[in-house]
Image (cartoon, helix red, strand yellow):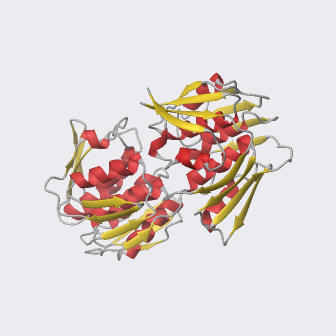
Amino acid sequence: MDKIEVEGINRLEGAIQISGSKNSSLPILASSLLIDEKIIISNVPNLSDVIFMIKILESLDSKINFKDSICQIKSNQPANLKVSYDLVRKMRASFLILGPLLAKYGYAEVSLPGGCAIGTRPVDLHINGFEKMGAEFVVKDGYIKGEVKGRLKGCEITLKKISVGATENIIMAATLAEGETIIKNAACEPEISDLSNFLVSAGAEIYGHGTNVIKIKGKKKLRGSEFSVMPDRIEAGTFALSVMGCSGKIILENVNDLICDHLKKIFEPLNVLSLNKKDNGEKLIVKKTNKFLDNVIFSTKEYPGFPTDLQAQLIASLIKSEVQSVIKENIFENRFMHVSELRRMGANLKQKGSKIIINGVREIHGAEVMATDLRASSSLIIAGLMASGNTTVNRVYHLDRGYEKLEEKLKNCGVKIRRFSE
């Protein structure tokens, strides 16, 4: 099993090329099942989650060529509309194939993602939406079997809770449904707009994406298309917080105006962090200033608020600050598993319910730590950059789910970092 060793550094200096968005790529790849003709998707990151999605599509008889960030896909009528547990268990986003399969073929049999149970988890939001569109479901032996007679029917769906995955799944299904579908209380994330823009390029009619009300007019067929995935705003935010943690100046390349403005807004309370756009928003200069940091309070929220996917990295970046900070997690329960690992390095962190109170310390020390999930793994890398001595991060397969060429990018900024196996 791979590990990463990182040596503490005082400053980051260099340029980093931001990869395409994982959270855009996965639903766009899933939506290829809706389209008979060839599609070409560029700026696709080479991540383990992307590879898992490609394997799922290939199990459904899609022909795929993925090389140099370009994914060419030709979907075909699957011989079998069942997707096994071995494929689905590795990635919760695999549930995004349910909507396209129901819309295109009228049937789907998909293993429930690990940890999900009908009745208590957000997977309900997907199922309830499809049921309103005319699908019927049976859960048996860990699989959910969905079937619809004829085409799905457009309708009005109000999500009980804002959900990115449910919004995406229903949008995809609605593109081939009969009539108009209206999604209320929809998620507004840029990645949903990216998926919608791809589908529009393939002939879909989608209005209002990026708002809480989305309208989709169903078509009988979609066409082939070429599309470039948006940059990854979470990766960009992670590297910005690395500068916050250990000082320096970096240039984030291959970003866009929306990401620059979003990061400037969500990091506004971090008055020591300077972010300036360059080249019409295609580059973002991130610099830590000599200002004195004010006490900060952050709460994770749905877009355009502070993303839960940057919560762990934010905590890591603040553990050596000279103030008290409070971070409140509002999106997910039990998303503080990185806290105990950061404490092993000397961080002064206290948990009170859904809040973490950070009392800054002068110094933290390198240690052997264990990644528990994707974003926790990146927080441990940030802490390793800030620590005296060397830090070894175990279970870095979590990191490979969402960060492309991380070691190479950090080396370009002067970091001594290596991957090794034992």
User: Which residue occupies 40% across, 75% down?
Assistant: 201
Residues 151 and 230: in front is 230
Q: Quadrant of residue 383?
A: top right
Residue 177 % position (x, y): 29, 68
Is 255 left, or right, of 220 in this rendering?
right
Residues 313 and 287: in front is 287
Note whether residue 285 is visible: yes
User: Which residue occupies 24% across, 54% down?
Assistant: 58
In the rendered image of this protein, does residue 397 appear above or below residue 223? above
The number of callouts visible is 0
Residue 336 % position (x, y): 57, 32
Q: Quadrant of residue 6?
A: top right
Tell me the quadrant of the picture where the N terminus can be found.
top left
Residue 361 % position (x, y): 77, 28
Tell me the quadrant of the picture where the C terminus can be found.
top left
User: Which residue occupies 24% across, 70% down?
Assistant: 36
Residue 161 % position (x, y): 48, 50
Q: Residue furthest left?
A: 79
In the rendered image of this protein, does residue 318 appear above or below residue 36? above
Q: Quadrant of residue 367?
A: top right
Residues 184 and 319: in front is 319
User: Which residue occupies 43% across, 68% down?
Assistant: 196
In the rendered image of this protein, does residue 205 appear above or below residue 325? below
Note whether residue 352 is visible: no
Is 196 left, or right, of 5 in this rendering?
left
